[in-house]
Amino acid sequence: MPSLQTALPPELANNVIRLYRECLRRARFIGHRQHNTELVVDMVRQQFKKHMHETDPEKIQKLKDDAARGLINHILYESEKMSGRKFSSSS
């Protein structure tokens, strides 16, 4: 199965720190809109911190894919919302 990270720019997908920063940016954006910034940002931080000592390359790749999936879903959600279409997670 190909990596979901190919949908993201390589400089973001290949670098965990940049991926983390982009996740935090999205978390702040979502949190600001929902008036729970601290909670959403803390959730992102906890997930990255929980796995910071992971050394298994396959697990790291899966974790990066999961983070990329979250970013892609949010980008799709925002773009569909802007175009007036309803977001569906099954598409």
Image: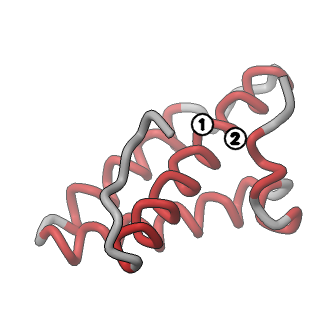
| Residue drawn at (43%, 51%) of the image | 45
Locate residue 44 relative to residue 30 in the image: left or right: right
**Residue at image coords 86%, 31%:** 2
Above-or-below relation of 63 to 49: above
Judging by the rendered image, the residue that carries numbered circle 1 is 66
Q: Amino acid at mark 2?
A: Lys
Q: Is residue 42 left or right of residue 46?
A: left
Identified at 30% across, 68% down, the residue is: 30
Cα separation between marks 2 and 1: 5 Å
Q: How is the image coloured?
A: secondary structure
Give the mark count: 2
| Image position of 13 with respect to 59: above or below | below
| Residue lying furthest left | 35
Residue 29 seen from this side = no
Look at mark 2 in the image and give the residue it sits on: 64
Horizontally, is 76 left or right of 62 in the view? left
What label does residue 24 carry, if any? none
Binning the other alpha carbons within 10 Å of mark 2 as few (below 14), some (14 to 19) or many (20 upward) gives many
- Expressed as whole percent of the image width and height from the top left, the position of residue 37 reads 23, 68
**SS at mark 1 in the image:** helix
**Residue nearest the observer in this picture, 75 or 29:** 75
Dot 1 crowding, Cα within 10 Å, few <14, some 14–19, many 20+: some
Q: Are marks 2 and 1 in contact (CB under 8 Å)?
A: yes
Rendering coords of residue 41 (x, y %) = 34, 60
Locate the N terminus by quadrant. Answer: top right
Quadrant in the rendering for residue 12: bottom right
Tell me the element at label 2: helix
Q: Amino acid at mark 1?
A: Asp
Horizontal and vertical percent for residue 59? 73, 22
Q: Is residue 91 left or right of residue 88?
A: right
Residue 61 place in picture, x, y as percent: 78, 32
Q: Is residue 24 above or below residue 39?
A: below
